[in-house]
Amino acid sequence: MFRESVNIALSALVSNKMRSILTMLGIIIGVGAVIAMVSIGMGVREQVQTSISSLGSNMLIVSPSSASTKGGLRSKAGTNITLKLTDAEAIKEDIKNIDYVSPTVNSQYQVVSGNQNWNTGVYGVTPEYMAIRTLSVGSGVFITTQDMNSRNRVAVIGSTVATNLFSEANPIGKNIRINNTPYQVIGVLDSKGQSTMGQDQDDVVIIPLTTAQERLIGVTYVQSINVQVSTAEAMDQVQDEITTLLRQRHKITGTKENDFTVRNLTSIMEMMTETTTMITLLLGSIAAISLLVGGIGIMNIMMVSVTERTREIGIRKALGATYHNIMMQFLIESVVIGVIGGFVGIILGCVSAILIAKFGGFNTVITAAPIIVSFAFSVGIGLFFGIYPARKAALLDPIEALRYE
């Protein structure tokens, strides 16, 4: 009987092709929209996680806090001159569970090579910066401790800078001019792409910290201290210890406000992940509304089908069909609409996600969870909204049904 009911349901759908297609359309669009929207949300979340991870794992960033004036106005964060190279050395020596410490300074400069020039950020760093930021050198070498001690005028450049200054030529061993001073290129970094905020991470020139402080920018302070903690579990403890140490070194007592801030990138990643998850759920929920509309469409068409086939139902009942037989026939018909619509919707959603990633500039991630959930939901909707029309058909009086014109 089950196989016969399926065959009858398929025959009914085939005999009314246009109506069946229009009925499935709500389910198809709903399932496709859920998969496409969730894939966009998942893509945004992955991009945020990748971008923050590119800054380094288990990272703490120490930077000067905003500087206040007598009038109570504050300048932007990081403008206060409070951190010294000795602070970074003290953190490295006095605090446990730390792998690397790298103080940095940076400024914008016009970099020149021959008749080519490029405006980019120049960063003064220590050799540990490479490990903290998970950088890799495609050709040449990175800055060494010897370069730091000797204040050498050497530079490691990003792939964007290399392309704009040297085109296809090999930059290793050639000179670039920063602030009218020659620096020898000793390495070219492998590409890291764009950050979440759209910044080009390859548009950078890296020189030794001491060279930047004394020979280029002319400062004695550092603008940030990057700290890589050994384990994620020790992050909070190390953050508290750094805060305590710097308060002691800067002679900050009692309730006085810190002249520095310590940011935990792990906490930032968790917060951003929660935010993007909520965005993904919101997008999926909005798209799921069309599934509900599709279910109402199924109920509407099934009600019409019951009315059109009243005489057929009467004949079937007169020939011995039971309440359960009629109920099963119409339920299977509505479920078949949900199943076929779900399959087509999955194909539509996956294709849409691929096209959005290719032409729309969005990063999309197709996962099994939204596909399974949306398909199960489409089948469930077909079943739920098919119950009332099926019950109405099953309860028809055979005598009245046979009289129906």
Image (spheres, rainbow, N blue to C red):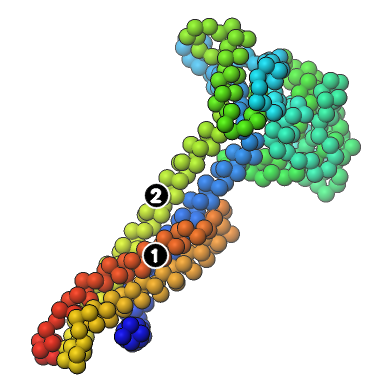
Residue 156: give x, y in percent of width and height: 79, 35
Provide the residue designation for mark 1: 376
Q: Residue at x 36, y 68 (%)?
A: 379
Above or below residue 14? Residue 94 is above
Provide the residue designation for mark 2: 282
User: Disc 2, disc 1: CB below 8 Å?
Assistant: no
Task: State how many labels appear.
Answer: 2
Residue 372: give x, y in percent of width and height: 44, 62
Above or below residue 207? Residue 285 is below
117 and 176: which is toward the camera:
176
Q: Quadrant of the N terminus?
A: bottom left
Residue 124 left/right relative to 269: right
Q: Nearer the viewer, mark 2 or mark 1?
A: 1
Residue 150 left/right relative to 261: right
Q: Quadrant of the C terminus?
A: bottom left
Q: Residue at x 71, y 41 (%)?
A: 202
Residue 197: give x, y in percent of width and height: 57, 40
- Badge number at residue 217: none
Viewer can see residue 284: yes
The image quarter in which residue 309 lies: bottom left
Query: Upstream in the sequence, badge 2 or badge 1?
Result: 2
Residue furthest to the right: 173
Viewer can see residue 226: no
State the CA–CA distance, disc 2 to disc 1: 19 Å
Q: Amino acid at mark 2?
A: Leu
The image quarter in which residue 132 lies: top right
Q: Amino acid at mark 1?
A: Ala
The image quarter in which residue 370 lies: bottom left
